[in-house]
Amino acid sequence: MDELLSGLRAAAEATRVRILFILAHGEANVSELTQILGQSQPRVSRHLKLMAEAGLISRHKEGNWVLFRLREEDMGGALSRAIVDLLPGADPVLAGDLARLEEIRSRRAEAASRYFAENARRWEQLRSLHVREEDVEQAMVRLAGTGPIRLHVDLGTGTGAVLRRFASRAQHAIGIDSSRDMLAIARVNLEQDQIRNAQVRHGEIYALPFPDGFADFVTIHQVLHFLEDPARALAEAARILEPGGRLLIVDFAPHDVDELRTEHAHRRLGIAAEHMAQWLARAGLTLTQHDVLPPPWRKETRGLTVSLWLATAPHLTLTSTPQMDRAS
């Protein structure tokens, strides 16, 4: 009861209701909210602080930014969504807020497009060496099975493609990447696809900002070949898996395309199956399936084989209590 009343009191102000409406359409930082609301930064920050303390919104720091979004869980999240759902669709103030939000999104999209255009040639060159990305993602979906996903964490999320692929199955999803440029692209892609149950965060794959047993599904798509210590990254992924959780990994099989070291910053020329098996075992995971996708055949080029591995975390085992001997 106290939590509900606290949330209602925190939301009982016109600007705060507008903030909830804006954040229902995606996360935003203080500067963006200030532009949309037409209010001073100290005033907006004060509103945000009160709502965060009441559990209506969540905040996280990303470099010099602090990003805000509606809470996804608990009573505060349910209350925030309920308030937004009750707002009149034709309200002129809210319509103006939404229009200014779209202007900001357009600027984000333009910046992301410029970054991608500058790197597009290198990306297309790499893609031409292996099977279509659409085929890789379909193979990931097949390997993941048909069961529900409570919380999906995508490590090295890049443009957010894997988040988008599994968005319809996951209750919640979080993408982690160390590149803020890539995160900007991922946010634009999620917004354009109107995906509300996924978010992205800046973070390091060796030190994930999550507690033990946080997620039931973790993906690592074309990331390990960039890393100095893939085994350490897999151990960290295993740490955040709940008992029985699944880890799905996609990477290149061993190859000899040496220019990928210099032109694409690959640290490793593919991942050997025996190395992966050793790393997963060391992380306490059980390898349940290993599939390969051969490259498209081209006489003039060397192709890249894509490997997929599915591993599971051990289930909790219940220790049985010995029954007391019964008198005969």
Image (spheres, rainbow, N blue to C red):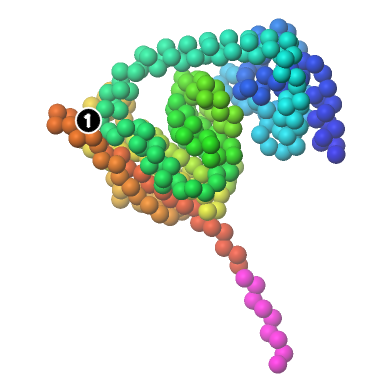
Residue 327 falls within the magenta-colored stretch? yes
**Residue 190 is inside the magenta segment:** no
Q: Secondary structure at mark 1?
A: loop
Q: Residue beneath label 1, please? A: 258
Q: Quadrant of residue 251?
A: top left
In the current view of this chain or complex, which residue is farthest to the front?
90
- Principal SS element in the magenta part? loop
Query: Is residue 235 at least partly visible in the picture?
Result: no
Q: Which of the pair 88/162 is nearer the observer?
A: 88
**Residue lying at 55% horizontally and 22% vertically, measured from the top left:** 191
* Left or right of residue 84: residue 226: left
In the image, residue 292 above or below residue 70:
below
Foreground: 162 or 46? 162
Q: Is residue 214 above or below residue 125?
A: below
Write the residue at 73% across / 10% down: 92
Label 1 amino acid? Asp
x and y, in percent, of residue 206 in the image = 47, 37
Q: Position of residue 268 (x, y in %)?
A: 30, 35
Q: Quadrant of the C terminus?
A: bottom right
Q: Position of residue 88 (x, y in %)?
A: 75, 19
Residue drawn at x 49%, y 42% is 218
Q: Which residues are magenta?
A: 320-328
- Residue 67 place in picture, x, y as percent: 62, 22
Q: Quadrant of residue 14?
A: top right
